[in-house]
Amino acid sequence: MIAIEHWGLIEYRSAWQKQHELVKRVQSGDAPNTLVFCHHPTVVTMGRNGSDANVIGDRSEMESKHIEVIPINRGGDVTLHNPWQLVGYPIFRLSDYKEDLHWFLREIEQCIIELVAKHGISAKRIDGLTGVWTHEEKKLCAIGIHCSRWVVSHGFALNVCNNLSEFDLIVPCGIKEKSVTSIQKEVIDSVDFEEVMAQCAQIFSQHF
């Protein structure tokens, strides 16, 4: 049984600090395995394998719009978060399940594949590329995690009904030849963010 927390729209740095505190509580046994849901004001994050070359937006213009580029300790390259993108931080003790990061990444992918299927979207994995993609190989969901003492942090970013034009600021995940999409863009209709979040919580609770 996992706990669910809702942090709403929260600045990235504040969420990162709250994650850090929650990780320590899960490690010590003072908190249960917890799935956090939130979304962020527009921000670019750069994982351990990231490259400045993949931030292609005009830096001065980004600064004028208060869009930060923040190096962080998750795996992966560059990604972008913005409002109405569903961000999930599963702060889980893998020792309660399986001490296998590859297994955990595949489980997250499967949860998202099942979630978007509820909206009529057939999604898939691509060998060698962590994340969830449409069959036209447009990216729906980016995934990047960090692990310390078998407690994982960071997680996934699922494009629900967010502004995809802001992804022009980066080369998403460092992959130039593939574009991004969202649930709303794929279904060509309005999408209820709260409903997607509730469905996601239910699926993760079934898997974990």
Image (cartoon, rainbow, N blue to C red):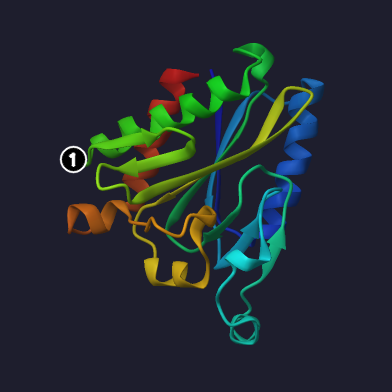
Above/below status of 96 relative to 138 = above
Q: Residue at 79% across / 23% down in the picture? A: 149
Q: Is residue 155 visible?
A: no
Disc 1 residue crowd, few under 14, some 14–19, many 20+, Cα 10 Å: few
State left or right for residue 49 relative to residue 107: right
- Give the total number of marks visible in the rendering: 1
- Tell me the quarter of the picture where residue 27 sits: top right
Q: Position of residue 75 (x, y in %)?
A: 65, 42
Q: Amino acid at mark 1?
A: Gly
Q: Farthest residue toward the front?
A: 177
* SS for dot 1: loop
Q: What residue sits right under mark 1 in the picture?
A: 120
Q: Residue at 51% across / 72% down in the picture? A: 169
**As rendered, which of 136 and 74 lies closer to the eye?**
136
- Tell me the quarter of the picture where residue 65 sits: bottom right
Above/below status of 198 relative to 173 = above
**As rendered, which of 78 and 186 lies closer to the eye?**
78
Above/below status of 13 relative to 200 = below
Q: Position of residue 26 (x, y in %)?
A: 74, 26
